């Protein structure tokens, strides 16, 4: 079942022409080898049968709680937030009575204190997500949340914890084992930004009542031929074409990629995509900067730069064929707006999307439209699976590793050194030199 279609009509504008893609046989062979070696679990989701059973068994427990507090950051939070905003929007609208999903994804004293002050501990499940089990931001939240639960609930506190982490190692795995607390694994080789369709995102989805099985099926269906070893199937796959297009764009000097989402319900996917793209491809002086934008909101903010700024931008343009029509405009209209007669509010979104897409093309912005049939979990799963594969293949075509994030680790080590963690002698010396440097400070 096709979730939608890609429109390549305006992909090759300005300085870019149809690039010479690398050998599909080479890419197919590498995909087959990496899948066989267990290095790309996002692609085939080999853990899904076991996780499906785990989630079915977990549902009665989830139903006992009115609130879920997720402690996670980056890939441990962005997928869950995108799912919440897309498929559980009622939490942000008047009259919602629950359940409630809260995501603590920052070192934010105000928010964490508000959770501890206002959430009823006896009705709250705290879900702690860290693949390594050592993410300092998440672990610091966990230590305080555990203390809060113990103070409020006594010995029953562990029944209000669910730890999602490495299956065999790390601090959170040790905690789960020591307490006998419920836990679920993050599969090996499944990095945070590729982990939304795993326990990381599917546990919050199950709590909200989202059709997570359809989400998984969409991802599986869109990627199933990539691991087949058939070079013809790989060459025809939209992820391969998107990767070749993006590699060609970067070679031609297009170093910014607009992710323009004209599906308001899916607006949060711009943040999920930004991490996926930037953390995977920003390496060795290479990459393109993701620019998330939401239609029509950002027509009135950053679109001026897209249309009339530096000619270094290309665009992935998301639309949906089947969005709500909304209520009709009344027969009596202001004199300046007669063209709204007989229209419905939802038609405005489609008109604005067409106008913006044409304006981008008219000003020479290379653009590929991703037109989805519906705003369903199945289609969202297809979107996520497609963009994950396009990101990985783009990295391979660039000659970099799209799975690691070495520069991010430097900042983490420096932060730990500032807090006095053992070792890290080099980082501590760098910190001292940085803090002791002559300052140029100006009052405001």
Image: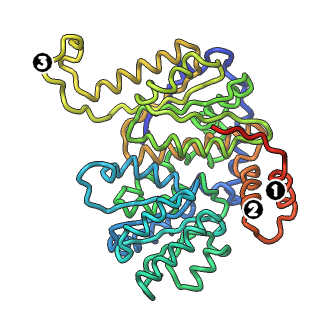
Q: Which residue is mark 1?
A: 431
**Looking at the image, is mark 1 or mark 3 earlier in the sequence?**
3
| Residue that appears at 23% across and 17% down | 340
How many dots with numbers? 3
| Residue that appears at 86% across and 53% down | 433
Q: Label 3 near label 1: C-beta < 8 Å? A: no
**Looking at the image, is mark 3 or mark 2 earlier in the sequence?**
3
Q: Quadrant of residue 341?
A: top left
Q: Give how far apart the Cα atoms at labels 1 and 2 are.
A: 7 Å
Q: Give x and y (percent) for residue 156.
A: 42, 85
Q: Give x and y (percent) for residue 410.
A: 77, 54
Q: Label 2 near label 1: C-beta < 8 Å? A: yes
Q: Label 2 near label 3: C-beta < 8 Å? A: no
Tag of residue 332: 3
**Looking at the image, is mark 1 or mark 2 earlier in the sequence?**
2
Tag of residue 418: 2
| Residue that appears at 29% across and 48% down | 93
């Amino acid at each position: 079942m096709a979730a939608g279609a890609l429109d390549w009509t305006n992909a090759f504008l300005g300085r870019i022409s149809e690039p010479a893609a690398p050998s599909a046989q080479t890419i197919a062979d590498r995909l087959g080898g990496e899948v066989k070696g267990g290095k790309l679990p996002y692609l085939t989701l080999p853990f899904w049968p076991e996780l499906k059973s785990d989630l079915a068994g977990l549902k009665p427990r989830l139903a006992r709680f009115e609130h879920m507090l997720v402690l996670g950051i980056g890939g441990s939070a962005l997928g869950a937030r995108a799912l919440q905003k897309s498929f559980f929007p009622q939490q942000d609208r008047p009259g919602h009575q629950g359940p409630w999903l809260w995501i603590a994804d920052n070192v934010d004293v105000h928010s964490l204190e508000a959770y501890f002050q206002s959430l009823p501990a006896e009705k709250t499940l705290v879900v702690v997500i860290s693949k390594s089990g050592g993410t300092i931001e998440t672990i610091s939240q966990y230590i305080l949340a555990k203390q809060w639960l113990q103070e409020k609930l006594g010995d029953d506190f562990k029944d209000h914890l669910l730890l999602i982490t490495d299956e065999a190692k790390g601090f959170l795995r040790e905690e789960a084992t020591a307490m006998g607390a419920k836990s679920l694994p993050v599969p090996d080789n499944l990095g945070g930004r590729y982990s939304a369709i795993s326990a990381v995102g599917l546990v919050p989805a199950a709590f909200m009542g989202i059709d997570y099985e359809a989400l998984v099926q969409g991802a599986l269906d869109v990627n199933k031929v990539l691991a087949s070893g058939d070079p013809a199937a790989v060459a025809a796959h939209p992820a391969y074409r998107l990767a070749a297009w993006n590699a060609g764009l970067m070679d031609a000097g297009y170093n910014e990629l607009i992710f323009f989402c004209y599906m308001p319900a899916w607006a949060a996917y711009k943040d999920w995509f930004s991490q996926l793209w930037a953390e995977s491809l920003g390496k060795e002086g290479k990459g393109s900067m993701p620019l998330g934008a939401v239609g029509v909101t950002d027509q009135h903010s950053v679109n001026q730069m897209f249309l009339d700024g530096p000619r270094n931008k290309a665009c992935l343009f998301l639309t949906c064929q089947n969005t709500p029509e909304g209520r009709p405009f009344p027969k009596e209209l202001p004199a300046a707006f007669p063209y709204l007669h007989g229209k419905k509010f939802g038609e405005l979104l489609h008109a604005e999307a067409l106008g913006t897409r044409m304006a981008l093309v008219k000003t020479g912005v290379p653009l590929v439209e991703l037109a989805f049939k519906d705003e369903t979990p199945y289609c969202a799963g297809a979107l996520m699976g497609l963009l994950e594969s396009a990101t990985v293949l783009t990295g391979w075509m660039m000659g970099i590793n799209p799975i690691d994030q070495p520069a991010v680790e430097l900042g983490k080590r420096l932060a730990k050194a500032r807090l006095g963690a053992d070792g890290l002698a080099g980082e501590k010396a760098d910190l001292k030199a940085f803090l002791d440097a002559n300052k140029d400070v100006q009052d405001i």
